[in-house]
Image (spheres, helix red, strand yellow):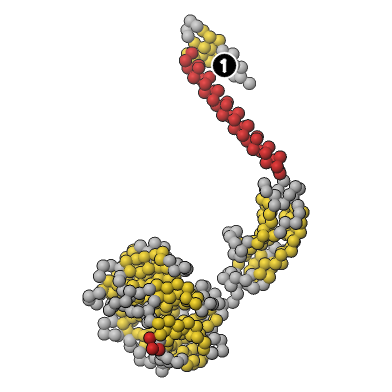
């Protein structure tokens, strides 16, 4: 310990003292500054110690012991399926008081996958049994945690049990098709027994449709006079709508659902992205003098076709999918019928040139180069993706072809069918086709006709809905 005993040397105007076995001297003015620094430092340290001690004492005096939780069911790594019920058995106790007890099912990031459940507190020591129904079809296969949280008002403790949940198998819940007799749009559903039932109707016209099995919603874009609608298929009701400005030109041109946003292309020269509630959240303006039509989302990009108002120039535009900021564009030769993506760097462009001859181009995003892949035997009417390598292409020569991306070659899938629209059902391995007043189902990969459903009017579009 240092000894502090200053001696003033008035002759030299110095102060000298011994500290830690050494002699220190300084001028009087410097000494007073030194004393002030020591005083303020010691005061701050003392204040800090008092604050820490006071805070600690307050907590200890209130409740220094956290609650104790024991979960006896489920056991670690117990397995469940979506729609199963988890029976949770637990005991919770505290030496003084329990204020809250909650139960949650969380993912491995400890985010809730089902709503938090409040357990009634019956005393400072209690046991409870509670059932968690895994009733969310969106829960994917993987590990999850059953979490019990208890608080005594001052201390909070959490205890977990790790479980495994297997997702609900995907299944087709309906085929939806759109007709337009007498200027009225009708949406109808084909069920698993191939019976038709009405869903919803409205006045106007349409340009394109899309569907989201995740949201259980159908999206239909108007054209000249029709509104653009988001339709809740569970309630059979309109969820939100965008109104057209009716003129001598089209208003809406296309619709595409991607990353939980619904993108609509406008003849006025822009693309808008709407959120779950129909609020516009995203926007991209096409190059001046162009209007956007067909769209495709492939993370991290959003891609659309745009055409010149005056001449026949056509381009493909690549945007950042998050910001919708335009990154690059490239001239293409065809009017796009369908954009497909084998992966995040390649885009297949199925379309027709100015002579209505079918063409297939291959666009690479990383190099911003578009190359002709194939000259097709007839006009392209529709196309759909089966997997990363395989695509079905309907043409106006009454044939649906299968395109192999790796081999870059066509083969016949089904003959004698003039498909206006084509979708692929990957659960049942079927091509779902709209042809005149019918919806036809073809087995894949054989191409044999599996079923035909008759409609009352020409089918304008067809979509396949799954349970998730």
Q: Foreground: 199 or 419?
A: 199
Residue 95: image x %, image y %? 76, 48
Residue at mark 1: 22
> In the image, is 355 to the left or to the right of 102?
left
Q: Tell me if residue 393 can be seen.
A: no
The picture quadrant where one finds residue 311 is bottom left
Instruction: Pick the quarter of the image with the N terminus.
Output: top right
Is 454 above or below relative to 36? below
Relative image position of residue 303 (x, y in whole percent): 37, 70
Is residue 426 or residue 440 the one in the foreground?
A: 440
Nearer to the camera, 205 or 31: 205
Q: Is residue 386 visible?
A: yes
Q: Position of residue 358 (x, y in %)?
A: 32, 84
Residue projecting furthest to the top:
11
Q: Judge by depth and name the residue closer to the eye, 400 or 421.
A: 421
Quadrant location of the C terminus in the rendered image: bottom right
Report the label total: 1
- At 28% from the left and 74% from the top, the residue drawn is 307
Instruction: Locate residue 248 relative to residue 382 in the image: left or right.
Output: left
Look at the picture and state if 424 lies above or below 240: below
Q: For the view shown, which residue lies furthest in the left direction?
A: 311
Residue under the image location 74 percent in, 61 percent down:
128
Judged left or right of residue 197, residue 285 is left
- Dot 1 surroundings within 10 Å: few (below 14), some, or many (20 or more)? few
Q: Residue at x 35, y 76 (%)?
A: 253
Provide the secondary structure element on which disc 1 rests: strand
Residue at 47 percent across and 73 percent down: it is: 239
x and y percentages locating residue 255 in the rendered image: 40, 75
């Amino acid at each position: 310990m240092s000894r502090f005993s200053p001696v003033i040397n008035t002759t030299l105007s110095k102060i000298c003292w011994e500290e830690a076995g050494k002699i220190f001297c300084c001028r009087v003015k410097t000494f007073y500054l030194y004393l002030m620094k020591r005083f303020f430092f010691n005061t701050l340290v003392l204040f800090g110690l008092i604050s820490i001690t006071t805070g600690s004492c307050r907590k200890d005096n209130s409740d220094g012991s956290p609650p104790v939780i024991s979960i006896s069911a489920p056991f670690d790594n117990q397995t469940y399926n979506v729609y199963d019920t988890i029976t949770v058995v637990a005991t919770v106790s505290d030496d003084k008081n329990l204020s809250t007890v909650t139960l949650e099912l969380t993912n491995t990031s400890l985010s809730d996958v089902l709503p938090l459940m409040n357990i009634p507190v019956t005393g400072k020591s209690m046991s409870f049994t509670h059932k968690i129904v895994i009733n969310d079809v969106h829960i994917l296969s993987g590990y999850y945690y059953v979490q019990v949280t208890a608080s005594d008002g001052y201390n909070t403790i959490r205890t977990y049990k790790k479980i495994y949940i297997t997702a609900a198998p995907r299944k087709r819940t309906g085929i939806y098709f759109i007709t337009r007799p007498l200027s009225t749009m009708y949406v109808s559903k084909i069920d698993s027994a191939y019976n038709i039932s009405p869903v919803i109707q409205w006045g106007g016209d349409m340009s394109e449709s899309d569907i989201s099995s995740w949201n259980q919603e159908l999206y239909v874009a108007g054209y000249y006079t029709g509104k653009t609608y988001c339709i809740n298929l569970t309630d059979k009701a309109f969820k939100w709508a965008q109104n057209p400005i009716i003129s001598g030109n089209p208003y809406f041109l296309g619709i595409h659902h991607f990353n939980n946003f619904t993108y609509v292309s406008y003849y006025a020269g822009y693309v808008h992205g709407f959120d779950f509630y129909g609020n516009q959240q995203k926007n991209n303006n096409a190059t001046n003098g162009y209007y956007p039509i067909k769209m495709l989302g492939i993370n991290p990009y959003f891609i659309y076709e745009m055409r010149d108002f005056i001449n026949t120039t056509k381009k493909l535009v690549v945007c950042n999918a998050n910001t919708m900021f335009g990154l690059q564009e490239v001239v293409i030769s065809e009017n796009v019928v369908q954009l497909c993506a084998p992966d995040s760097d390649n885009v297949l462009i199925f379309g027709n040139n100015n002579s209505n001859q079918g063409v297939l181009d291959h666009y690479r995003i990383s190099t911003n180069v578009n190359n002709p892949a194939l000259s097709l035997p007839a006009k392209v009417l529709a196309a759909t993706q089966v997997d990363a390598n395989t695509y079905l292409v309907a043409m106006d020569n009454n044939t649906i072809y299968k395109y192999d991306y790796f081999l870059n070659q066509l083969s016949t899938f089904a003959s004698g069918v003039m498909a206006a629209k084509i979708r692929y059902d990957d659960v049942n391995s079927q091509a779902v086709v709209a042809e005149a007043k019918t919806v036809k189902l073809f087995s894949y990969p054989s191409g044999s006709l599996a079923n035909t459903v008759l409609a009352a009017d020409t089918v304008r579009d067809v979509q396949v809905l799954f349970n998730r």
